Amino acid sequence: MTQAIETVPVGVVQLPEPCWELVYARTGEEWDGGEVFPHFADQSEAESYAASLDDEPPLTTRRVDARCITASAACGAPLEDDNGALLCFSAVEELLREARDYGWSVRDGVLRCEDGDDCQPETTKE
C-alpha cells in the first residue's frame, strides 16, 4: 500500500512540456537503458544522448504523452541517472522512492541530494 504524500517537497515539479524518450528505431519499443527508462527535457538532448551510445542498435526519439514529474535538490542538482539522463516519473511517490535509492532525502520539506545538510542553494559562483 502506498502512503499518501501530505505535502510535495520543494524541488519536485511537473515539467511544463512533455519529455522525450529514446525508442528503438526499428520497432518503436521504448529503450530501457539497462536499468531505467531515461527521459530528456528536449529532443536535442535526447538525440545527443542517443548519438553517444556506441554499442546500441539505432535509436530515435519520441515525445512522451504526458508531462513528467522530476526534481532538483536544494543545491540545484537535478535528479539524474548515472549517465546524466533526467529521471522522470508519473507520480510523486515513485520519484521520492527513487530519490531515496540515490541517497537523497527530504528535510524540512525540501529535497536534498546525497550531500544531506550540505545541500544548500549556491549563493555565489566563482
Image (cartoon, rainbow, N blue to C red):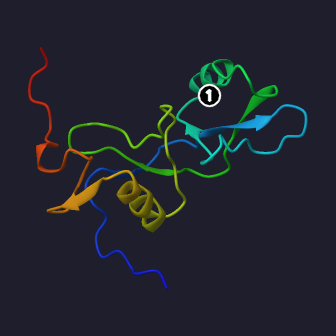
For the C terminus, the quadrant is top left
Question: What amino acid type should be assigned to the residue bearing mark 1?
Answer: Ala
Name the residue: 27% across, 45% down.
73
Q: Is residue 5 left or right of residue 41?
A: left
Q: Is residue 73 left or right of residue 125?
A: right
Above or below residue 116? Residue 120 is above
Q: How many residues crowd around disc 1 within 10 Å: few (fewer than 14), some, or many (20 or more)?
A: many
* Among the 4 quarters of the image, the one containing residue 22: top right
Residue 90 location in percent, x, y? 55, 60
Name the residue: 68% across, 50% down.
65
Q: Is residue 46 left or right of residue 95?
A: right
Q: Residue furthest left?
A: 123
Q: Residue furthest right?
A: 26
Above or below residue 56? Residue 91 is below
Q: Residue furthest bottom?
A: 1
| Element carrying mark 1 | helix
Residue 44 location in percent, x, y? 60, 21
Q: Is residue 99 left or right of residue 36?
A: left
* Residue behind mark 1: 46
